[in-house]
Structures are given as structure tokens and as C-alpha cells.
Image (cartoon, grey):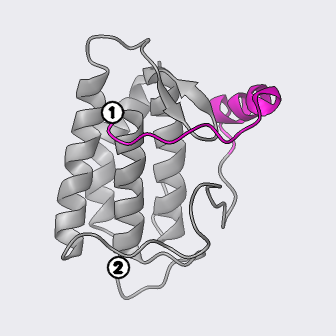
Amino acid sequence: MDRAKLIFLESQFIPLIYKIDPAVPPRWGKMNEQQMVEHVSAFFKLSSDKLRVALVTPPEQLTKFKEFLNSEKEFRENTRAPILPEDPLPVRKANIQEAINELENEVKDFIDYFKDDHEKKTMHPVFGELNFQEWVQLHHKHVKHHLKQFGISI
């Protein structure tokens, strides 16, 4: 497993969110900062089996998607998950701080969920069943994409 990516998710990711300037519009996409944070929070809930969504990728395409997942290729700008609506979901939290607090808890819960068994798997609707290492890879790729969207490069 890429320990550096796990350390990034555990301790470096959340502080970078605080560096996002809410006065600066995102480089692409329709989400505002809070919608992005809540979106990423839901993504972590998916990995820790708190949120379940069926597989939408045809089984014969999973190998190709897993190759992308395991590569260092980045998500393209404006990449939209096939299970999400065209327009961003409305915010659920009262403010950005509450959204960040929830995200911080979800990151911890994800790590705790896999603490005793890194090989157990949970479903991602595009990439299929993923173990801890695969989720770390995907979360890192995903949060890096959204940080870049809001002008934070890592």
C-alpha cells in the first residue's frame, strides 16, 4: 500500500481544505466549496459501507476501470460520476465548518472501518468491489482532483 497516500488522507488533506478561498470560483464544475466537501464526505461514507450504491459499470469494463484506478492518471476536469445528477446536490450542513467536521469524521471512520481487515471490500458504483488499498488509491485521486478544482495543488 502507498503509505504516503494514506498519511495524506489522514493528516494533510483536511488542512488543505482550509486554504480554499471561498471568494475564488472553482476552476471547473458547478459545485461550490461546501457542495464539494459534502460530496467528498459522501464518497468516504461509500467506502466505509455507510452508503451503498449498486454497480453501474458493465462487468466486462471493470478491468479497464481498475487499470485507471491503479494508475497515477488524474481524473479529467468536469468528470462526473454516473450516479450523480447533472447539477450539484443541495448542501446538507448549515455551513462549511460543519461540512468539514463531518468530512474529517468520515475520513477517520473509513480508516477505522478497515483497521482490522484491509482485504474486506466495499462497492464503488464505477470501480466495483474495492479493498482498503484500492480505496486509499481512489480517495487520494479523488481528493487531489477536487483540491485542484479549487486551486490547491499537491
The residue where tag 1 is placed is 7
| Numbered-mark total | 2
Left of 57 or right of it: where is 5? left
As shown in the figure, which amino acid type bears the numbered disc 1?
Ile
Q: How far apart are marks 1 and 2 (CA)?
A: 24 Å
Q: Is residue 118 above or below residue 92?
A: above
Q: How crowded is mark 2: few (under 14 residues within 10 Å), some or many (20 or more)?
A: few
* Residue displayed at 18% across by 69% down: 97
Query: Judging from the image, what secondary structure is the residue with disc 1 in?
Result: helix
Residue 28 image offset from top left, x and y in percent: 60, 75
- Residue furthest toward the right? 60
Magenta span includes 95? no
Depth check, front residue: 65 or 59: 59
* Residue displayed at 48% across by 20% down: 131
The residue where tag 2 is placed is 21
Residue 34 image offset from top left, x and y in percent: 33, 72
Q: In which quarter of the image is residue 55?
A: top right
Left of 65 or right of it: where is 141? left
Q: Residues within 10 Å of mark 1 (few under 14, many from 20)?
A: few
Residue 40 image offset from top left, x and y in percent: 40, 54
* Residue displayed at 26% across by 66% down: 18
Q: In this view, does 21 lie above or below 39?
A: below
Query: Judging from the image, what secondary structure is the residue with disc 2 in?
Result: loop
As shown in the figure, which amino acid type bears the numbered disc 2?
Asp
Residue 43 image offset from top left, x and y in percent: 42, 47
Marking on residue 66: none
Mark found first going from the N terminus, 1 or 2: 1
Q: In this view, does 68 lie above or below 116?
A: below
Left of 92 or right of it: where is 65? right
Q: Is there a contact, CB below 8 Å, between mark 1 and mark 2?
A: no
Q: What stretch is highlighted in magenta?
A: 49-73
Q: Quadrant of residue 71?
A: top right
